[in-house]
């Protein structure tokens, strides 16, 4: 297997932006789930609160799937979120292209 062509700076920037967006999304989602849990503890006996919490959970799950599985490897097209972790891997599992970290700014 030959070494894949390295990613361009714009491709690397797009991939690392995607990872930052995932971190922000998951941070906000966790805070919203904690808020929903607190509301369930305080007002859980109300049916509309339970239904709203379950609906909110499904919305967050759908949005999380969209955010995580949206980005693809620029070389082979493998979905980068399919590796199952929040962090971008060192290289693509499909083609082996290296995802170089951007220099610290």
Image (cartoon, rainbow, N blue to C red):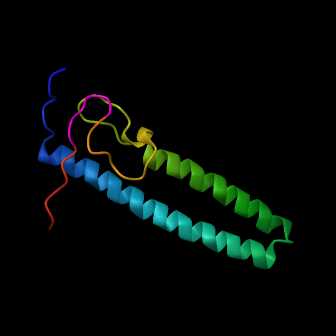
Q: Is residue 72 left or right of residue 34?
A: left
In depth, the one of 89 and 33 nearer the eye is 89
* Residue at far bottom of view: 42
- Point out residue 55 in the picture as x, y percentages from the top left corner: 70, 56
Residue drawn at the location 27% of the way across and 45% of the way down: 90
Q: Is residue 4 left or right of residue 53?
A: left
Residue 75, image x, y percentages: 23, 31
Secondary structure predominantly adopted by residues drawn in magenta: loop
| Residue 99, quarter of the rendered image | top left
Q: Is residue 71 above or below residue 25?
A: above
From the viewer's perspective, is 98 left or right of 42?
A: left
Q: Quadrant of the N terminus?
A: top left
Q: Is residue 68 above or below residue 21?
A: above
> In the rendered view of the protein, which quadrant contains the C terminus?
bottom left
Name the residue at 14% across, 28% down.
3
Q: Residue at x 40, y 61 (%)?
A: 23
Q: Is residue 82 left or right of residue 19?
A: right
Residue 35 % position (x, y): 63, 73
Asked if the stretch drawn in magenta spans residue 15, the answer is: no
Instruction: Tell me residue 18's x, y (percent).
Output: 33, 52
Q: Which residues are magenta?
A: 93-98
- In terms of image quadrants, where is residue 47? bottom right
């Amino acid at each position: 297997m030959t070494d894949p062509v390295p990613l361009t700076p714009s491709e690397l920037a797009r991939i690392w932006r995607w990872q930052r967006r995932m971190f922000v999304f998951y941070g906000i989602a966790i805070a919203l789930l904690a808020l929903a849990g607190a509301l369930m503890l305080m007002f859980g006996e109300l049916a509309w609160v339970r239904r709203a919490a379950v609906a909110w959970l499904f919305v967050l799950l759908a949005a999380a799937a969209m955010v995580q599985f949206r980005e693809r490897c620029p070389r082979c097209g493998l979905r980068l979120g399919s590796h199952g972790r929040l962090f971008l891997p060192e290289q693509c599992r499909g083609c082996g292209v290296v995802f170089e970290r951007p220099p610290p700014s």
